[in-house]
Image: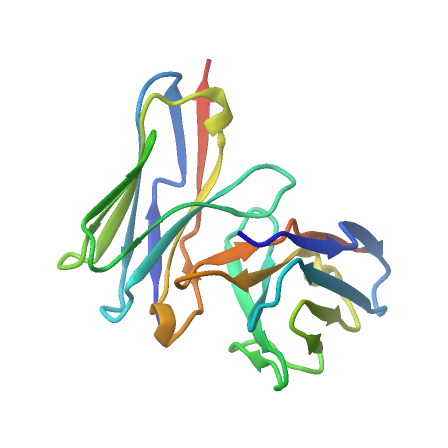
Protein backbone atom coordinates (compact mmCIF):
# COMPACT_ATOMS: atom_id res chain seq x y z
CA UNK A 1 0.00 0.00 0.00
CA UNK A 2 0.84 3.67 -0.07
CA UNK A 3 3.51 4.93 2.35
CA UNK A 4 3.68 8.67 3.03
CA UNK A 5 6.64 10.12 4.90
CA UNK A 6 6.56 13.64 6.30
CA UNK A 7 9.36 15.90 7.56
CA UNK A 8 10.08 17.59 9.84
CA UNK A 9 8.08 16.30 12.79
CA UNK A 10 8.33 19.66 14.54
CA UNK A 11 8.98 23.14 13.17
CA UNK A 12 9.41 26.38 15.07
CA UNK A 13 9.47 29.65 13.13
CA UNK A 14 9.51 33.33 13.95
CA UNK A 15 6.35 35.20 13.11
CA UNK A 16 6.62 36.57 9.60
CA UNK A 17 9.05 33.91 8.42
CA UNK A 18 8.20 31.06 6.06
CA UNK A 19 7.52 27.42 6.94
CA UNK A 20 8.09 24.48 4.63
CA UNK A 21 6.91 20.91 5.19
CA UNK A 22 7.92 18.09 2.85
CA UNK A 23 6.30 14.75 2.08
CA UNK A 24 7.23 11.80 -0.08
CA UNK A 25 4.98 9.01 -1.30
CA UNK A 26 5.68 5.53 -2.60
CA UNK A 27 2.81 4.64 -4.96
CA UNK A 28 3.22 6.19 -8.39
CA UNK A 29 -0.54 5.66 -8.96
CA UNK A 30 -1.37 8.30 -6.33
CA UNK A 31 -2.71 11.42 -7.97
CA UNK A 32 -4.40 13.48 -5.26
CA UNK A 33 -2.48 15.19 -2.45
CA UNK A 34 -4.34 17.17 0.23
CA UNK A 35 -2.98 19.03 3.23
CA UNK A 36 -4.84 19.25 6.51
CA UNK A 37 -4.43 21.54 9.49
CA UNK A 38 -5.46 20.23 12.89
CA UNK A 39 -5.79 22.60 15.81
CA UNK A 40 -5.91 21.34 19.37
CA UNK A 41 -9.25 19.71 20.14
CA UNK A 42 -10.52 19.91 16.57
CA UNK A 43 -10.81 17.71 13.53
CA UNK A 44 -8.48 18.07 10.54
CA UNK A 45 -9.34 20.95 8.22
CA UNK A 46 -8.56 20.77 4.52
CA UNK A 47 -6.41 23.81 3.68
CA UNK A 48 -5.17 23.09 0.17
CA UNK A 49 -4.83 20.20 -2.24
CA UNK A 50 -3.12 19.44 -5.52
CA UNK A 51 -3.67 16.93 -8.29
CA UNK A 52 -1.08 15.20 -10.38
CA UNK A 53 -1.77 17.24 -13.48
CA UNK A 54 -0.62 20.42 -11.71
CA UNK A 55 2.87 21.30 -10.47
CA UNK A 56 2.00 24.15 -8.13
CA UNK A 57 -1.05 25.70 -6.50
CA UNK A 58 -1.33 28.80 -4.37
CA UNK A 59 -4.01 30.17 -2.07
CA UNK A 60 -3.05 33.45 -0.40
CA UNK A 61 -0.18 32.65 2.01
CA UNK A 62 -0.28 28.91 1.36
CA UNK A 63 1.24 27.10 -1.61
CA UNK A 64 1.80 23.48 -2.49
CA UNK A 65 4.26 22.07 -5.02
CA UNK A 66 4.32 18.60 -6.53
CA UNK A 67 7.14 16.71 -8.22
CA UNK A 68 5.64 13.52 -9.65
CA UNK A 69 8.94 12.24 -10.97
CA UNK A 70 10.56 12.40 -7.55
CA UNK A 71 7.28 11.53 -5.80
CA UNK A 72 7.38 14.38 -3.35
CA UNK A 73 5.21 17.35 -2.52
CA UNK A 74 5.65 20.29 -0.19
CA UNK A 75 3.58 22.83 1.73
CA UNK A 76 4.83 26.40 1.93
CA UNK A 77 3.39 28.94 4.36
CA UNK A 78 4.63 32.50 3.95
CA UNK A 79 4.38 35.40 6.39
CA UNK A 80 3.52 33.06 9.23
CA UNK A 81 1.19 34.24 11.96
CA UNK A 82 0.53 32.84 15.47
CA UNK A 83 -2.77 31.37 14.25
CA UNK A 84 -0.79 29.16 11.87
CA UNK A 85 0.40 27.17 14.91
CA UNK A 86 -1.11 23.70 14.55
CA UNK A 87 -0.35 20.15 13.42
CA UNK A 88 -0.20 19.79 9.64
CA UNK A 89 -0.77 16.48 7.86
CA UNK A 90 -0.05 15.61 4.26
CA UNK A 91 -1.92 12.78 2.58
CA UNK A 92 -2.11 10.91 -0.72
CA UNK A 93 -4.75 8.93 -2.56
CA UNK A 94 -5.51 7.51 -5.98
CA UNK A 95 -8.39 9.94 -6.33
CA UNK A 96 -11.54 8.63 -7.93
CA UNK A 97 -9.94 5.21 -8.37
CA UNK A 98 -9.66 4.79 -4.60
CA UNK A 99 -10.70 7.51 -2.20
CA UNK A 100 -8.72 6.14 0.73
CA UNK A 101 -6.27 8.66 2.15
CA UNK A 102 -2.85 7.65 3.44
CA UNK A 103 -1.53 10.21 5.91
CA UNK A 104 1.92 11.37 6.85
CA UNK A 105 2.94 11.39 10.50
CA UNK A 106 2.26 15.10 10.95
CA UNK A 107 4.29 18.24 11.60
CA UNK A 108 3.76 20.36 14.70
CA UNK A 109 4.28 23.98 13.68
CA UNK A 110 4.87 26.63 16.32
CA UNK A 111 4.95 30.28 15.29
CA UNK A 112 6.83 32.40 17.82
CA UNK A 113 5.52 35.93 18.30
CA UNK B 1 -17.81 21.94 2.08
CA UNK B 2 -20.03 19.67 4.15
CA UNK B 3 -20.89 20.41 7.78
CA UNK B 4 -20.25 17.34 9.88
CA UNK B 5 -21.17 16.75 13.50
CA UNK B 6 -20.23 13.92 15.83
CA UNK B 7 -21.73 12.74 19.08
CA UNK B 8 -20.50 12.43 21.72
CA UNK B 9 -17.65 14.92 21.50
CA UNK B 10 -15.85 13.08 24.29
CA UNK B 11 -16.44 10.26 26.72
CA UNK B 12 -14.78 8.34 29.50
CA UNK B 13 -15.68 4.65 29.54
CA UNK B 14 -14.89 1.59 31.59
CA UNK B 15 -13.06 -1.32 30.03
CA UNK B 16 -15.30 -4.07 28.71
CA UNK B 17 -18.10 -1.69 27.73
CA UNK B 18 -19.07 -0.44 24.27
CA UNK B 19 -19.58 3.06 22.89
CA UNK B 20 -21.49 4.07 19.78
CA UNK B 21 -20.34 7.22 18.00
CA UNK B 22 -22.68 9.05 15.67
CA UNK B 23 -21.75 11.04 12.58
CA UNK B 24 -24.25 13.37 10.91
CA UNK B 25 -23.65 15.36 7.72
CA UNK B 26 -25.77 18.21 6.37
CA UNK B 27 -25.93 16.88 2.81
CA UNK B 28 -26.31 13.51 1.13
CA UNK B 29 -23.01 11.74 0.52
CA UNK B 30 -22.24 8.34 -0.91
CA UNK B 31 -19.01 7.63 0.92
CA UNK B 32 -18.29 8.06 4.62
CA UNK B 33 -15.10 7.04 6.35
CA UNK B 34 -14.09 6.30 9.93
CA UNK B 35 -10.57 7.03 11.16
CA UNK B 36 -8.73 6.49 14.42
CA UNK B 37 -6.12 8.93 15.70
CA UNK B 38 -4.19 7.58 18.65
CA UNK B 39 -2.68 10.12 21.07
CA UNK B 40 -0.08 12.24 19.32
CA UNK B 41 -0.29 10.14 16.17
CA UNK B 42 -1.52 10.40 12.62
CA UNK B 43 -4.84 9.23 11.21
CA UNK B 44 -5.48 5.59 10.36
CA UNK B 45 -8.46 4.51 8.28
CA UNK B 46 -10.70 2.00 10.04
CA UNK B 47 -13.33 1.44 7.36
CA UNK B 48 -15.27 2.87 4.47
CA UNK B 49 -19.06 2.98 4.85
CA UNK B 50 -21.23 3.25 1.76
CA UNK B 51 -24.98 3.44 2.07
CA UNK B 52 -26.68 0.20 1.14
CA UNK B 53 -23.65 -2.03 1.47
CA UNK B 54 -21.51 -3.56 4.17
CA UNK B 55 -18.62 -1.48 5.44
CA UNK B 56 -15.17 -2.28 4.07
CA UNK B 57 -12.56 -2.67 6.80
CA UNK B 58 -8.85 -1.97 6.55
CA UNK B 59 -6.21 -4.44 7.61
CA UNK B 60 -6.08 -4.71 11.38
CA UNK B 61 -9.69 -3.70 11.95
CA UNK B 62 -12.58 -6.18 12.20
CA UNK B 63 -16.32 -5.85 12.20
CA UNK B 64 -16.77 -7.56 15.57
CA UNK B 65 -14.66 -4.88 17.24
CA UNK B 66 -15.84 -1.88 15.18
CA UNK B 67 -19.34 -2.52 13.82
CA UNK B 68 -20.56 0.24 11.53
CA UNK B 69 -24.03 1.19 10.41
CA UNK B 70 -24.96 3.39 7.44
CA UNK B 71 -28.73 3.60 7.36
CA UNK B 72 -29.00 6.57 4.98
CA UNK B 73 -26.97 9.08 3.00
CA UNK B 74 -26.49 11.56 5.87
CA UNK B 75 -25.74 9.38 8.90
CA UNK B 76 -23.41 6.66 10.15
CA UNK B 77 -22.43 5.10 13.46
CA UNK B 78 -19.26 3.43 14.65
CA UNK B 79 -19.33 1.23 17.72
CA UNK B 80 -16.18 0.51 19.68
CA UNK B 81 -16.89 -2.83 21.34
CA UNK B 82 -15.49 -4.48 24.45
CA UNK B 83 -13.19 -1.54 25.01
CA UNK B 84 -9.72 -1.66 26.53
CA UNK B 85 -7.37 1.22 27.43
CA UNK B 86 -5.65 0.70 24.05
CA UNK B 87 -8.84 1.95 22.39
CA UNK B 88 -8.32 5.40 23.89
CA UNK B 89 -8.13 7.59 20.79
CA UNK B 90 -9.84 10.26 18.77
CA UNK B 91 -12.36 8.74 16.39
CA UNK B 92 -13.10 10.82 13.30
CA UNK B 93 -15.61 10.49 10.55
CA UNK B 94 -15.11 12.04 7.15
CA UNK B 95 -17.20 12.37 4.03
CA UNK B 96 -16.40 12.66 0.35
CA UNK B 97 -16.68 16.06 -1.21
CA UNK B 98 -16.25 17.21 -4.77
CA UNK B 99 -13.33 15.90 -6.78
CA UNK B 100 -11.81 13.40 -4.32
CA UNK B 101 -11.80 15.78 -1.37
CA UNK B 102 -12.59 14.57 2.15
CA UNK B 103 -13.96 16.67 4.97
CA UNK B 104 -13.63 15.66 8.60
CA UNK B 105 -15.89 15.97 11.58
CA UNK B 106 -14.68 17.41 14.90
CA UNK B 107 -13.90 13.98 16.35
CA UNK B 108 -14.90 11.98 19.40
CA UNK B 109 -12.30 11.85 22.15
CA UNK B 110 -12.48 8.55 23.97
CA UNK B 111 -10.70 7.61 27.16
CA UNK B 112 -11.00 4.04 28.39
CA UNK B 113 -10.13 3.35 32.00
Nearest the camera: A101 or A109? A101
Q: Is residue B41 left or right of residue A15?
A: right
Q: Residue furthest bottom?
A: B53
What residue is rendered at 43% in x and 51% in y? Answer: A105
User: What percent of the width, then of the height, locates residue B24?
Assistant: 70, 61
| Quadrant of the rendering where the C terminus of chain B is positioned | bottom right
Q: Using the image, determine if residue A103 lies above or below residue B46.
A: above
User: What percent of the width, then of the height, locates residue B107?
Assistant: 66, 52
What residue is rendered at 84% in x and 58% in y? Answer: B13
Nearest the camera: A84 or A13? A84
Q: How is the image coloured?
A: rainbow
Q: Is residue A73 left or right of residue B84?
A: left
Nearest the camera: B24 or A86? B24
Q: Using the image, determine if residue A84 lies above or below residue B13.
A: above
User: What percent of the width, then of the height, locates residue B97?
Assistant: 49, 60
Q: Is residue A82 left or right of residue A8?
A: right
User: What percent of the width, then of the height, locates residue B92?
Assistant: 62, 58
What residue is rendered at 39% in x and 74% in y? Answer: A98
What residue is rendered at 44% in x and 69% in y? Answer: A100
Amino acid sequence: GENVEQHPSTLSVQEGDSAVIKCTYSDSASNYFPWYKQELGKGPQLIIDIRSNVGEKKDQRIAVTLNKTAKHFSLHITETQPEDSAVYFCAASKGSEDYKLSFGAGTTVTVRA
Amino acid sequence: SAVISQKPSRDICQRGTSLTIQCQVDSQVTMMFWYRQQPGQSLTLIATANQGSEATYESGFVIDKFPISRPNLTFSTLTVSNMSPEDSSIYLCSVEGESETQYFGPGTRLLVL
